[in-house]
Amino acid sequence: MSEASGTSLITVDKVNKFFGAHHVLRDVSTYFNAGQVSAILGASGSGKSTLLRMLNRLERHDSGRIVVDGIEVDDDLKHLDALRRELGMVFQQFNLFPHLTVLDNVSLAPRRVRKTLRADANERSMGLLRRVGMEDHAHKYPFALSGGQQQRVAIARALAMNPKVMLFDEPTSALDPEMVKEVLDVIKKLAQSGMTMIIVTHEMGFAREVADRILFLDQGQVAQDAPPEVFFGAQESARVRAFLGQVSH
């Protein structure tokens, strides 16, 4: 797909970001299409998570423009409110409310933000918990769950607002190795359902299998934007080859 296809949900245009004197993102321009699964890869410190977090204004960009489904990403509160309805986000840490049950964690935002009736919100939330394999744990509290189970609940919670785009910021990096697969399997099913997703990950096999497109960031710039078969294939870029050599054990 190309930007010219007219299906771009998100456009990033000449975006720069500084942390103090450190130039984290340098004139980044890219786009994300509806129905596309994009994986953002790169070495630690390359700006992957910063780029992802700027899409929903968790980080401010210093210059350039970001537009999400026609919404300008800026400090306008109406824009922010609309933006947060469009984008669901899953973090490295699960950030579940410890004093709420699994069901209440998932149904809280629709009840508070969309004013959905509790019975309707609970019914939909149970459906989402079923989708991520957590229906039987609906009335437990987060402390009773494994890390992988908590992350699956966090995915259901992000889906509860019916977002157009799901953002994943290294969703398995805080998990024990044996729990990684159960979370990746849930994300794979979402990808197969046609959900638009942008995933920052260090799981190369997963990125190769699930993504339609690989965005490789190097020193704050988009160094390569390619289909997985090209990125992981006979790679012409020495920098990408070095990166893949480091992450392939």
Image (cartoon, helix red, strand yellow):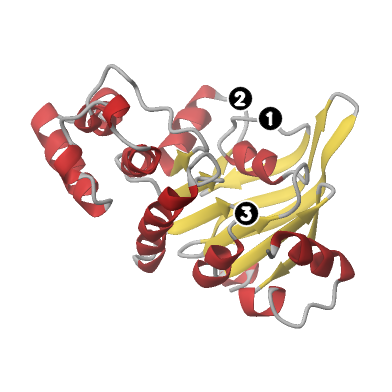
- 126 sits left or right of 65 in the view: left
Few, some or many C-alpha atoms within 10 Å of disc 2 (few <14, some 14-19, many ≥20)?
few
Q: Residue at x 87, y 36 (%)?
A: 23
Q: Residue at x 70, y 80 (%)?
A: 233
Q: Residue at x 70, y 73 (%)?
A: 231
For mark 2, what is the residue?
75
Q: In the rendered view, would you say 156 is above or below 29?
A: above
Q: Is tag 2's residue or tag 1's residue first in the polypeptide sequence?
A: 1
Q: CA distance from mark 2 to mark 1?
A: 9 Å
Q: CA distance from mark 3 to mark 2?
A: 31 Å
Q: Is tag 3's residue or tag 1's residue first in the polypeptide sequence?
A: 1
Q: Residue at x 45, y 29 (%)?
A: 81
Q: In the rendered view, would you say 105 is above or below 227?
A: above
For the residues bearing labels 3 and 2, Cβ distance under 8 angstroms: no
Callout in the foreground (3, 2): 3
Q: Quadrant of the C terminus?
A: bottom right
Q: Position of residue 196 (x, y in %)?
A: 46, 58
Q: Work out whether residue 40 or residue 116 is closer to the camera in this orientation and state it.
A: 40
For mark 3, what is the residue?
202
Callout in the foreground (2, 1): 1
Q: Which quarter of the figure has residue 198? A: bottom right
For mark 1, what is the residue?
60
What amino acid type should be assigned to the residue bearing mark 2? Asp
Q: Position of residue 119 (x, y in %)?
A: 8, 32
What amino acid type should be assigned to the residue bearing mark 3? His
Q: Is tag 3's residue or tag 2's residue first in the polypeptide sequence?
A: 2
Badge 3 element:
loop
Q: Work out whether residue 77 or residue 173 is closer to the camera in this orientation and state it.
A: 173
Few, some or many C-alpha atoms within 10 Å of disc 3 (few <14, some 14-19, many ≥20)?
some
For the residues bearing labels 2 and 1, Cβ distance under 8 angstroms: yes
Badge 2 element:
loop
